[in-house]
Amino acid sequence: MRKVIAFLVAVALIGMLFISFVSASTIEKENSTGELVGMVIGALLAGIIGIVTVGFTQHREAKKTKKYIASALLSEVQVNQEELQGLINLVHEAEKFEKGNLSLVDIFPKELRFEKTLYSALADKIGLLDSKSKDNLVLYYRDISLLENLLKLSREEGAELIKVLGKEIATKGHLIRAEEVYKRGEELIKSLKDQI
């Protein structure tokens, strides 16, 4: 759409200049200079107005898109934060379970899935966000993917992490990592809200 508008403005300018030169050659010499200058100034003004209009429209569209992206990603991050909060609550309640018959490993979720649908769908538009939000967003989604993979690894038979650290220590490390990701998510929520 923007290219079409710019093309139409350029065609209009060229047409006005052509008409002004054709008409200037047919008009008497003493009047033609003033008319020619008037037409050229008019054409330039029309061109400037066209360029400003296109620029304003592009800026407004980018701002609207940025708000949409920030709002959509904000809702997805908030859903993921709720999931992370559940994991963090396990860390704080770990002592209760370790004193009873259950271990932390027994109550830890079998599978962990974070929402990444909107992040994936809007990946090509993330560049419209400010640099702080963009960087935090990429790191946040990298970290939640890592959490999912670490849980899968800690559940698999013979996983190296479990062999080296033991199942209980590996699970606690996973939960500590969840707290770090949650903090990054809270920062991300603040920066996304600032862009809405």
Image: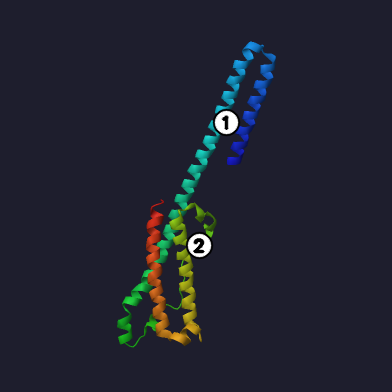
Q: Residue under label 1, please give it.
A: 47
How many numbered circles are shown?
Answer: 2
Marking on residue 117: 2
Question: Circle 1: is it few (<14), some (14-19), or many (20+) Cα within 10 Å?
Answer: some
The residue shown at (31%, 82%) is 95
Which quadrant of the rendered structure holds the N terminus? top right
Q: Is residue 83 visible?
A: no
| Residue 173, position as x, y percentages in the image | 40, 78
Between residues 79 and 35, which one lies in front from this camera angle? 35
The residue shown at (42%, 62%) is 77
Between residues 130 and 97, which one lies in front from this camera angle? 130
Q: Is residue 15 visible?
A: yes
Marks 1/2: CA–CA distance? 43 Å
Q: Would you say 41 lies left or right of 185 here?
A: right
Between residues 79 and 57, which one lies in front from this camera angle? 57
| Residue 163, position as x, y percentages in the image | 47, 87
The residue shown at (46%, 69%) is 143
Question: Circle 2: is it few (<14), some (14-19), or many (20+) Cα within 10 Å?
Answer: few
Residue 182, placed above or below residue 102? above
